[in-house]
Amino acid sequence: GSRIPEYRRVLMPTLSLAVLVCGTLSMLTGDPIRFIFYGIGLCIATVMFTLNGKQIMEHSNGEENMWSGDSEFRKASVLLIVTWVPFPLWFFLSPEGIGLIDDILVIQMGWAFLNILSKFTFIFYIQRVKDNYCNRLKVKRELTGSGSGAVNPNEGMEQLAGMLGIAPSANNPLAAKAASKEKELGAVVIETMNFLGMAQHNDRFLNLLREAGVKTV
């Protein structure tokens, strides 16, 4: 979201790449150099997980942390950390580490299990978040009549005037239809920008659409 610094978009993938590079070098080198690379990679991974926890606080303005909170962002971050922590531990126990487990079948099954667990659980959770968001958006549009959900102090008077046939668009169905479509566009823009964490740009984006003559979805 907009509360998280932009440089993290580059920093976090870079840290992940650095961990992979350290792991590869640890496999290709011998004692004691490989343990040095393993230690460096473990430290980088710890920094990465710490930043994941920090981003929970940044995203919630300090209302949530690693141990408390109920937002979908926090749950996704915790799920990411929990499912990726076993990777360096399993690496350490394998022949690339101290060799405590030397059965090739067990090692390969372990890597396969960890990869399936980490990737598929995260994918399924993000898909669930997306489905829930779409369902909430659909319900909100139905409840607000495709409006943006903003409170209009003159809405009651406008409805009364429409019922009495004295509203500007009461006898103009085309104008009423155009206004309804414009409200629907506003609702889509507002909901989308809020979901992307860019709610502060709602007015600017809507103005750009009006200037471009875009009035419908």
Image: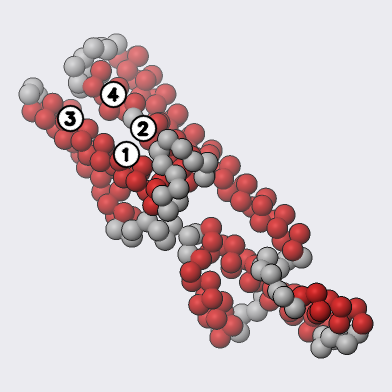
- For the residue carrying disc 2, how many other residues have a C-alpha within 10 Å: few (<14), some (14-19), or many (20+)? some
Q: Kindly identify the residue that appears in the image at 76 percent across and 75 percent down.
A: 155
Instruction: Check if mark 2's residue and mark 1's residue have beta carbons within 8 Å.
Output: yes
Q: Position of residue 113 (x, y in %)?
A: 42, 24
The answer to which of marks 1 and 3 sits earlier in the sequence is 3
Q: Earlier in the sequence, mark 1 or mark 4?
A: 1
Q: CA distance from mark 1 to mark 4?
A: 15 Å
For the residues labelled 1 and 3, the Cα–Cα distance comes to 16 Å
The kind of residue on which mark 4 rests is Leu
Please give the name of the residue rendered at 76% of the width and 59% of the height, measured from the top-left corner.
143
Residue to which mark 1 is pinned: 49
> Residue 38's mark?
3
Does 172 sit above or below residue 128? below
In this rendering, position of residue 187 left or right of residue 72? right
Q: CA distance from mark 4 to mark 2?
A: 10 Å
Dot 1 amino acid type:
Phe
42 relative to 211, above or below = above
Where is residue 23? Give x, y as percent: 21, 32
Q: Nearer the N terminus, badge 3 or badge 4? A: 3
